[in-house]
Structure formats: structure tokens, C-alpha cells
Amino acid sequence: MTEEQVRALALALPEVTEADHHGRPSFRLGTAVLATLWAPGILNVMVGESEARAAEGGAVSLLWWGKRLYGVQVDLTAADEALVADFLEEAWTRRAPARLRRQRP
């Protein structure tokens, strides 16, 4: 996947915006960071621990911040669109207020 494809998927989610995050593009719902294009070909996505551990392997590795598991790091050169879309949707669902979640099919 390309960064532009990731951007299109992320920004298609309700009320998601793009903003700078320490010099890197991030996708946010309000002030909450859902995902960050961390390095060329690398996407960090803030998903829950169970989702992260279940997906580990292949294009997906665990994203640690110190001793805390924050989500997953996706190698975009090895990931397909469905995988990235699922992670972005999961990150959005974790942070979306009830009013937005009710509007999603």
C-alpha cells in the first residue's frame, strides 16, 4: 500500500482529520491520534492489546512505547488494503463517541 492509499482510507472515516505529529502525518479523531505514518512504508495504528496481539506476524509487529503496548506497526510494503482498513476502523471505533458509532453501518 502507498501512503496516499492509507491517507484516503483514514480520511474516509467520519470526522477524521490529518495533523502533524512530531513532524509526521497523523490521523486523528478530535485530539486522539488513531494512526501515524511513522517512516516511509511504516504505519503505526493505535489498536487495543488483544487486537494487536492477535494480528502480530507477517506485515504486522507490536508497537511498544516503553513497557506499554500501544498498538501495531504495519509494513505497508507487505500489507494489503483490507488489513490496513481493518486496523484504521478498529482504532476509530475505540476512540469514536457513541453518536458517531451509531451512525456507522
Image (cartoon, rainbow, N blue to C red):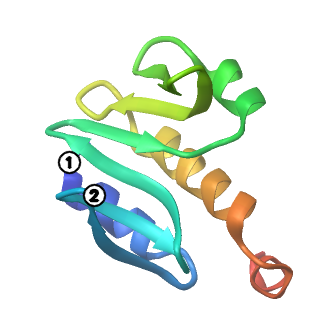
> Residue reaching furthest top?
57
The residue at 40%/66% (across/down) is: 27
The residue at 63%/63% (across/down) is: 92
Vertical side of 55 occupied by 89: above or below:
below
Quarter-of-image position of residue 79? top left
The residue at 42%/30% (across/down) is: 73
In which quadrant of the rendered image does the C terminus lie? bottom right
Please state which amino acid type lies under the numbered disc 1. Answer: Thr
Q: What's the mark number on residue 104?
A: none
Residue 19 image position (x, y, % from top left)? 31, 73
Q: Is residue 29 left or right of residue 53?
A: left
Pointer 1 local density, CA inside 10 Å: few below 14, some 14–19, many at least 20: few
Q: Is residue 57 left or right of residue 102?
A: left
Residue 8 image position (x, y, % from top left)? 33, 68
Q: Is residue 92 left or right of residue 44?
A: right
Vertical side of 35 occupied by 80: above or below:
above
Q: Secondary structure at mark 1?
A: loop
Marks 2/1 in contact by CB < 8 Å: the verdict is yes
Quarter-of-image position of residue 17? bottom left
Q: What's the mark number on residue 5?
A: 2
Q: Is residue 82 left or right of residue 67?
A: left
Residue beneath disc 1: 2
> Residue reaching furthest front?
66
Residue 31 image position (x, y, % from top left)? 52, 75
Pointer 2 local density, CA inside 10 Å: few below 14, some 14–19, many at least 20: few
Please state which amino acid type lies under the numbered disc 2. Answer: Gln
In which quadrant of the rendered image does the N terminus lie? top left
Residue 74 image position (x, y, % from top left)? 39, 31
The residue at 72%/30% (across/down) is: 49
Label 2 to label 1, Cα distance in Å? 5 Å
Q: Secondary structure at mark 2?
A: helix
Vertical side of 64 occupied by 37: above or below:
below
